[in-house]
Image (cartoon, rainbow, N blue to C red):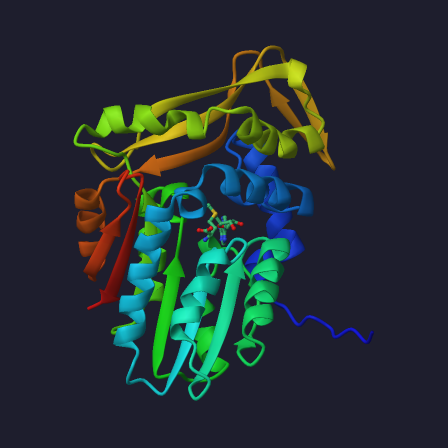
Amino acid sequence: MIHKFERVYVHPSQSPEQVYRDYLASFSLRQINHKFHYDSVKQSQKWLRIHERFSPSRNNPDCINAYKNCFQKAASILDNTSSWQLIGLGCGGGTKDNTLVSYLSNTEKKSIYYPVDVSLSLALIAAQKVRASYPNLSVQPIVCDLLHADDLIHLINKEGEADRTVITFFGMLPNFPPDQIMPILGNFLQKGDLLLLSANLAPGDDYLKGIHKIFDQYDNELTKDWLMTILIDAGVNQENGQIISYIENDQKTQDLKRIGVYFELRNDLNLELEDQLIQWEHGNKVQLFFSYRYNTTMIQKILNQYSINILDYWEAANQEEGIYLCQKQ
Ligand SMILES: C[S@@+](CC[C@H](N)C(=O)[O-])C[C@H]1O[C@@H](n2cnc3c(N)ncnc32)[C@H](O)[C@@H]1O
């Protein structure tokens, strides 16, 4: 069998120097940047397993239908366009983007899919998944850290023009403070672009009770094992502390809450990371992860602030996930 090279674009935001700076900052600030939980093949495989086990989009038929309804509507909007580009921001394994393509794909239209992820492994998995399903579609994986890539859309547009740009932002909103990611998303979108976005919701009318209801999706052994990987690789061991999770307030957006996951140290710990000595003390809490929970009213309010209109939305019957079809005004 003759293999072909996989051509991957790597944005400077994921250059080794930048990644190393972010890595050291994660340890010295005791706030692990989420991107380091998806970095290695081992981590991305662990995350895919957790996603398959806990994500309603994988195991709840009603939630899967909510996605399909959104895809159907997006496809009807694109009916009269002659070409489109699909950009999957934080594409993960690409399962949702792959289903979306099944609604958009029309062999007569010029089209391209850009799976964009901070993890090379996940960008490649998404690219290969979509290419296997649609061998005639152009697919160009991009490795990029969205937090340091203001020019990403300009670089993509330089590759070629399309009538319509469709951007997916599935499962991403919960993993960034809104005041950090929304200006980036707002700048990325251009007038008329379609944005398909999903968010983890707090089910029911009582926001706090709703968060308690889904708490176990984060407080479990599979998730702890995944989140410990980066610490163990750096020389921390399980005996140095314990993982604790709790509900906390966002520091900037009033009434917004998230589930925070921390590693609380049982003893003082010195870590030698190349030429830098990291000193953690007994009782320190190292932020490993957080996941914001929203309801649709909150999502509407946040998107409005960035001139993004919700054209339609679908909530899974258990109200644990919402899918929003949006357009930049
Ligand atoms: C919760 S997963 C969502 C994956 C996929 N969109 C889905 O819904 O199944 C978050 C994804 O964002 C990626 N990611 C995390 N931080 C990122 C960053 N700063 N820039 C780009 N991608 C990032 C991760 O590698 C991971 O694939």
Percent from the top left, x then y, of residue 152?
Answer: 46, 67
For this orientation, the residue located farthest to the right is 1
Percent from the top left, x then y, of residue 241?
Answer: 59, 15
Q: Residue at x 32, y 72 (%)?
A: 75
In this rendered view, identify the residue nearer to me: 37 or 271.
37
Q: From the viewer's perspective, is 316 left or right of 140?
A: left
Q: Residue at x 58, y 71 (%)?
A: 131
In this rendered view, identify the residue nearer to me: 262 or 108.
108
**Position of 68 relative to 275 (above/below):** below
Which of the 4 image quarters holds residue 163? bottom left
For this orientation, the residue located farthest to the front is 61
**Position of 69 relative to 7 (above/below):** above
The answer to whether residue 11 is seen in the rendering is no
Quadrant where the N terminus sits is bottom right
**Position of 57 relative to 124 (above/below):** above
Which of the 4 image quarters holds residue 212? top left
Quadrant where the C terminus sits is bottom left
The answer to whether residue 287 is seen in the rendering is yes
Q: Residue at x 49, y 72 (%)?
A: 113
Percent from the top left, x then y, of residue 142?
Answer: 56, 65
Q: Residue at x 43, y 77 (%)?
A: 105
